[in-house]
Amino acid sequence: MNAIGLSFFVAIVGLTLFVTYIASKRTNSASEFYTAGGGLSGWQNGIAIAGDYLSAASFLGIAGAIALFGFDGFFYSIGYLVAYLVVLYIVAEPLRNLGKYTLADMITARFDQKKIRAAAAISTLTIVLFYMIAQLVGAGALIQLLLGIDYWIAVLLVGVMMTIYVLWGGMAATSWVQIIKAALLMIGTVLISILVLWKFNFNILGMFTEMKSVTANGEAYLHPGVKYTNGLDTISMMIALVLGTAGLPHILMRFFTVKDAKTARSSVVYATWIVGIFYVLTIFLGFGAAAFVGSDAIIAANPAGNMAAPLLAQALGGDILMSFVSAVAFATILAVVAGLVLSGASAFAHDLYGQIIKKGKVTEKEQMNAARLASVGVSVFSILLALGAQTMNVAFLVSLAFCIAASANLPVIIYTIYWKNFNTTGALTAIITGLISALVLVALSPNLWAADGSMAFTGEALFPLTNPALVSVPLGFLGGWIGTLVGARADQRKYAEVDVKANIGLK
Amino acid sequence: MANNIESSVNSVSSLEKRKQNSSKSSNLRPSPTVGMTNYSAIAESEEFKALKKKKNKFILPITIFFLLSYILLPILTSYTTILNNNAFGDIAWVWIYAFALFVMTWVLCMIYVRRANEFDKDAEKIFDKEKAGDYE
């Protein structure tokens, strides 16, 4: 690590700690801690959503996937972007109108029962845990490469930083870390893209022509089918991507940081533009890395392709650009894991402790203590798991998190808002069926089973798809429907309230 | 705590006090008792039903449209090769399709905001009627 590289890292750590210090002065109530008092503006929350969403998996993973697999890598960019339409059209405004801090708040606005809150909190915690381990394992491996330090030190470094942000600065600090990171990430990506285009003489048609011959895949590189050859598996993965975003707890939580549905709406619009532009630029990152770094060098640095973007930066702009991009990647990881800690802590401290164990009878001080304690708990627990999970496949953990979000959370969200006859039993069965079917199907899938012993277990996979969303999402909806038929009649007056609140935001 | 406020709300009868209380007790459970927002009456009202119908008529077809156009891409790429033909130079149709999905996302995003602002105006009218006590 050279002096320039070190100074970028120190600058980012310093800036984020400064923001945390400022935020800590006003983080003195549960509402400030979980939602920054609901005081963020549309553009602030929009950029923060983008910062929360564009994880290391997006920046490093997609760039690497496009570099190695051409169009097949771009599938992720498409799915992650179109997902925002689901968020905007179906979820964002009713969620803002009904909820307070968590997804469980929104569902229990209609069905005020402890078991439903508990089920929603458990599904939130499961998603957060898988996503968090994925980010921490990825972060550890990456920082290990970038800084040349041991894996466990790298994980610990990220873990300590995220705990500091959340513990002292709550949602205000987390949001600003995400805003700073989104800005840095866009600057870095635009810069690299311009350099790549410059190398291709700003001729997009020429770039495609040249890409036909630079990789070992030849013309196939520009067509789908290099990586994804199983049609059902591809479709299943695309379903998980487009429907999962609207059920991710750390994204949903961001909608409580604004004052009303109108602001929630405008924040999705900002986020969609930023995220969309970023994903268009992933083409240049990927093509550039394939052309100017080469797939052999990319795979040599990291078999999954995660080093493609930093290596491209080095090839185009030398050590300075490489250091900048590495520092951006570091900030990216910090911003995402901080958001995850916060959503995990809210499920623990607000849902399980505050509302279920203490039945909502908690003082402001008790709430804050519980929230801080839960943040430390979630952090420590995930750091420990990440230290033991070094060899786990990160992409598999992320797609699993999306799949659970799409299967366990989305059906219950949609039914709660839009279905008049949906009832308590249905809410419970929707969450449980979605959660369990996603987990069980993954446990039986080729992610864990291989006949040649290359996976965790040796033997034929009982379930053929790597991503089970094609089956588990319909099962989640079906579970909720059957539960509703079996259960007691819905309280129509309660639905009238939810319906009115969700649609026009009347409190 | 909730019961206390609710009973105090019940005990006030003047319209003026009722309105003050209903704005304060926004986080309470609704009930058809005097002074609380009567959600059932709003839900049954013509203007609310009309707004909901308008919203659903806008949201449902567009949602079906974008989900179908989206999922058609992996279906076409998995089971046909028609998108592998070149559209411009060496840029195949699959890239054009993908880019069209990006444009679709941005355009639908803007359309949503424009329509949602119209819905806001209708919602405003319902707010005003509620404040005037028309849904008691």
Image: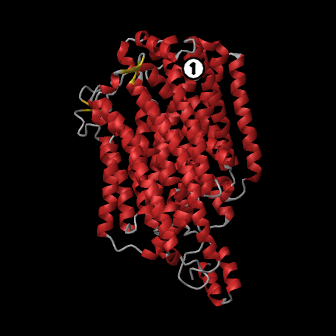
Q: Residues within 10 Å of mark 1 (few under 14, many from 20)?
A: many
Question: Which sits in the foreground, A60 or A373?
Answer: A60
* Residue at 61 percent of width and 69 percent of height: B125
Image quadrant where residue A66 sits: top left
Q: Which residue is mark 1?
A: A310
Question: Which sits in the foreground, B57 or A104?
Answer: B57
User: Residue B73 location in percent, x, y?
Assistant: 36, 34
* Residue at 49 percent of width and 21 percent of height: A286
Question: Which sits in the foreground, A109 or A123?
Answer: A109
- Compared across the picture, whether A124 is left or right of B131 comes to left
- For the C terminus of chain B, the quadrant is bottom right
User: Residue A40 location in percent, x, y?
Assistant: 68, 50
Is residue A498 in view?
no
Image quadrant where residue B92 sits: top left
* Residue at 38 percent of width and 68 percent of height: A423
Kindly identify the amino acid type of the residue bearing the numbered disc 1: Pro
- For the N terminus of chain B, the quadrant is bottom right
- Chain identity of mark 1: A
Residue A297 drawn above or below residue B66? above
Q: Secondary structure at mark 1?
A: helix
* Residue at 48 percent of width and 41 percent of height: A131
Image quadrant where residue A433 sits: bottom left
Residue B3 drawn above or below residue A361? below
User: Residue A354 location in percent, x, y?
Assistant: 57, 63
Question: Which sits in the foreground, A382 or A216?
Answer: A216
